[in-house]
Amino acid sequence: MYLVQILLPLYDNDGQPFPQNEYEQVRDELTEMFGGITTYVRSPAKGLWKESSTLTVHDDIVTYEVMTEPFNREWWLTYREELAVRFRQEVLIIRVSEMQLI
């Protein structure tokens, strides 16, 4: 079993919030594809990273999670590219972990 986490930004690079329907569309797509989803949207997470030695960038994100068996890497790579375009990101993070249910 695999846990897939998608980190979606709340704002574009100009600080404009993305419309709520963008998140609803992702939720609906993943629910349809995987039969369920967990969303962490109440308290946005804060992401920080160094663009250079003098510039630190931050982002407010929400996390969407799905569990899947098997893991289709090609599908996820394509979906990540689609989401990066929709959310106007140079890099959109999707991470996957192998897991066991107990």
Image: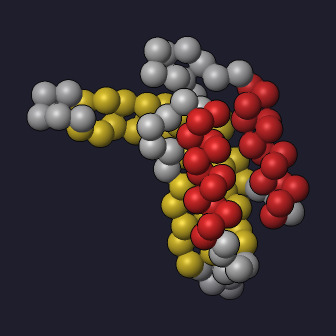
Residue 60 placed where, x, y %?
A: 49, 31
Q: Is residue 29 visible?
A: yes
- Total number of numbered discs in the rendering: 0
Residue 68 placed where, x, y %?
A: 72, 72
Question: For this view, does 69 lie left or right of residue 61?
Answer: right
Q: Residue at x 72, y 35 (%)?
A: 23
Q: Is residue 91 above or below residue 54?
A: below
Question: For this view, does 32 lie left or right of residue 63?
Answer: right
In the foreground, 63 or 33: 33
Q: Residue at x 13, y 28 (%)?
A: 54
Q: Residue at x 65, y 38 (%)?
A: 41
Quadrant for the N terminus, please.
Answer: bottom right
Residue 42 placed where, x, y %?
A: 65, 35
Quadrant for the C terminus, please.
Answer: bottom right
Q: Residue at x 63, y 83 (%)?
A: 100
In the foreground, 70 or 49: 70
Q: Is residue 72 above or below residue 11?
A: below
